[in-house]
Image (cartoon, rainbow, N blue to C red):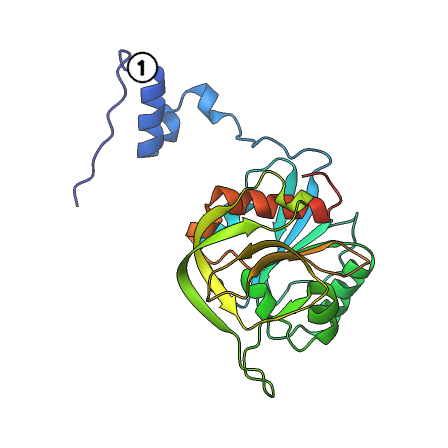
Amino acid sequence: MAVVKPETPSPRVPRAVAALTALALGIAGALPTAAQELFRPVPKAKDAVRVLLVTGGHDHDVSFYSVLDGQDDLDVRVDPHPNAFRGEVAPGRGADVVVLYDMPAAMAPGPEAHLRAFVEAGGGVVSLHHAIAGRTGWRWWWEEVIGGRYLETPEGDRPASTYKHDVEMTVRVAARHPVTAGLTDFRILDETYKGMWISPKVTALLTTDEATSDGPVAWVSPYSRARVVTIQLGHGREAHLHPSYRRLVRNAVLWVARRTP
Ligand SMILES: [Zn+2]
């Protein structure tokens, strides 16, 4: 392969073009002084909501991270399994909100105790999509905290839950609530779940008439010690990049943090 020797930009080449050319060619020595300043992104707001985003146990498109990235009032740290919740998390210290986009079959006793202590101390939780199929052996969690569970296998007379990808559906706003602030009914291409156990005590926020769905696709759980929102939507890019989905998740994070969306 021939070695291309970069040309020295002539004085007639505009300064910005010269800088971009130098960057593209990787000639540090040719960079103007201004481009050598240390890049510092805009700092997060001092009172930004501290979010612990827990992943692992299920693959997902990288576009998911864009749902929570780039917002000055959300300071998000990713805490993937198997290290998730290895340390204590306390609302007001370290994390105000836990966002679950994970699907662990079970969690080790230590991490489980840390997550339990977090919600019992009032820490907010937003459970997204496949997270409802994780921790299914932890009855207190799915029955009282989340208010729902995806059945991986049949249980007695109850068949296993089912999923369907790439479903075009209409999602309707079922309740006026801070989590649905700014939302109107919308169309989305996403994955549906059906045959889940959903607590009769939840407050449905969004519903769909789609036949392959249980109906409720976002709800507030009856758990009294912390604010907990479950959102079934959110499989792929079509959801992650959807303005209504992004607004929904942001609203949920702010509301469970006891901020105003
Ligand atoms: Zn999915």
Residue found at x 75% / y 57%? 89
Of 110 and 198, which appears nearest the observer?
A: 198
Quarter of the picture containing the C terminus is top right
Q: Is mark 1 within 8 Å of ligand 1?
A: no
Residue found at x 82% / y 58%? 225
Q: Position of residue 22 (x, y in %)?
A: 33, 28
Of 28 and 193, which appears nearest the observer?
A: 193
Q: Quadrant of residue 101?
A: bottom right
Q: Secondary structure at mark 1?
A: loop
- Would residue 59 be seen by someone viewing this image from the given angle? no
Q: Position of residue 152 (x, y in %)?
A: 54, 78
* Crowd band around label 1 with a 10 angstrom C-alpha radius: few (<14), some (14–19), many (20+): few
Q: Is residue 118 left or right of residue 126?
A: right
- Would residue 44 be seen by someone viewing this image from the given angle? yes
Residue farthest to the bottom, as pictured: 156
Residue farthest to the left, as pictured: 2
Residue found at x 36% / y 30%? 23
Rendered position, 23 above or below 246: above
Q: Which residue is mark 1?
A: 14
Q: Position of residue 187 (x, y in %)?
A: 45, 49
Q: Is residue 60 left or right of residue 47?
A: left
Q: Amino acid at mark 1?
A: Pro
Q: Quadrant of residue 19?
A: top left
Of 124 and 193, which appears nearest the observer?
A: 193
Q: Quadrant of residue 147?
A: bottom right
How many marks are shown on the rendered structure?
A: 1
Q: Is residue 36 left or right of residue 44?
A: left
Q: Position of residue 237 (x, y in %)?
A: 43, 51
Rendered position, 18 above or below 50: above
Residue farthest to the top, as pictured: 12
Q: Is residue 251 left or right of residue 116?
A: left
